[in-house]
Image (spheres, rainbow, N blue to C red):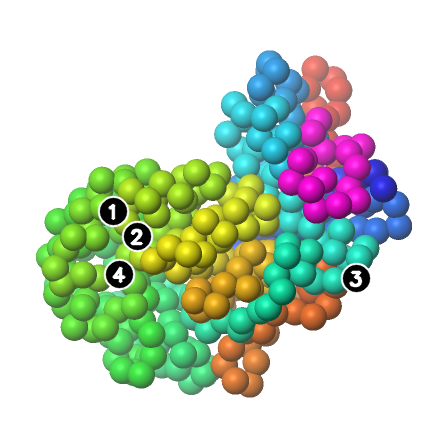
Amino acid sequence: MNIDSVDLYYLRMPTVTDAADGSQDALLVRIRAGDHEGWGECEGSPLPCIAAWCTPMSHGACRPVEDSVLGMPIDEPDDIRGINALVRDQSLDLLQAAHTLSGVDAALWDLLARAREVPVHTLLGATTTHAKLPYASVLFGDTPEETLERGRECRAAGFGAVKFGWGPFGRGSVDEDLALAEAAREGIGDDRHLMIDVGTRWIDDVGALEVRARRLAELDVTWIEEPFRSHELSAYAAAAAIDPHVPVATGEGAHEPAIAEQLIRHGRIDFVQIDAGRIGGITAAREVAEFARDLPVQYVNHSFTSSLALAASLAPYWDLEDSRFCEYPFAPSSLCREMTTTNIEVAADGLVHPPEAPGLGVTPDERAIERYRVPLEISVDGQTLFSG
């Protein structure tokens, strides 16, 4: 069968704020081939992703993503890998292409797995699977008191791990940051995993981590996430030598496997976090998972939006036994809660188990999609390139 059509849906909440909440808008991708269809989600600003899909060609290595997708055969997993490689080749100089490709790639895996009536992880070659321990992913409160309350809410919801991120953490003094971290630990209790996400605010300042390291170690922080920007390999390598060592996680900013692999090899990170909606889809994420399999680094998904994105982010590593954590959005927007009729749920045992349904195991709700859809038309020189 060949790819007959690709539809992109720009969804948005009625009001978008400057909070570090990526669930306020979304770009969904639907692909149809013959009698089958699949869905994916891009993690990135929807308009640039749509533009990358349909932009006029600038030159041979700066083509629109659609040139490498429409009409292509999709009968085998290697067909998907071939499309992924073709997009990277023909859209080499189109930097938003990786985000657009990510949603397309996930939809292709969903489509082919549905056609074969197997889960995506089976199509990827997984012969065994391992449930993951979800960590509730929440933002720091504006104050220690608000943070304490959010921690208590996550504990009451039964999560065995909680990650606090962004908010005021990293913007103020050492004492202010540690007060937030201490409130987070008090809120969730001593028997839960605590992760802290700096959101790259220290850029490349290793000293900022070093002066906080002893207290963070005393708080038994499972990891400190994204203390530096993704390309600051020297800073990450220096952080690995800090005593006491606070485990470091990063990788969500990687838009190709090589970036994640460099962070593992040269940044000496402890956890590599991959967003299948950014790195180039499930194909690219699986490559990193296989690279990390036999190394002293745990693979972790990154996902802060819908169950569709969550399912795609989990598919690449269900068979990695030693990679046991998974990010789980605790309070996404109504848009991301409502856009699917089936969801990835936390089971009674407190774990997330791989879906048994065909494809990604998540079904979009087209009525909800229509409620949140933003009508859009892109025209150049009188020619309509996109309408949706």
> On residue 269, which mark appears?
2
Tell me the crowding category of disc 2: few under 14, some 14 to 19, or many 20 or more residues within 10 angstroms, Cα based: many
Q: Contact, CB < 8 Å: mark 3 with mark 2?
A: no
Res 130 quadrant in image: bottom right
What type is the residue that disc 4 sits on? Pro
> On residue 47, which mark appears?
none
The Cα–Cα distance between marks 2 and 1, rounded to whole angstroms, is 7 Å
**Identity of the residue drawn at 50% across and 63% down:** 320
Q: Earlier in the sequence, mark 3 or mark 2?
A: 3
Q: Earlier in the sequence, mark 2 or mark 1?
A: 1
Magenta stretch: includes residue 72: yes
The Cα–Cα distance between marks 2 and 4, rounded to whole angstroms, is 7 Å
What type is the residue that disc 3 sits on? Glu
Magenta stretch: includes residue 322: no
The Cα–Cα distance between marks 3 and 2, rounded to whole angstroms, is 37 Å
In the image, the segment drawn in magenta is 67-83
The residue indicated by pointer 1 is: 236
Residue 21 visible in this rendered orientation of the protein: no
Q: Which of 33 and 55 is in front in this view?
A: 33
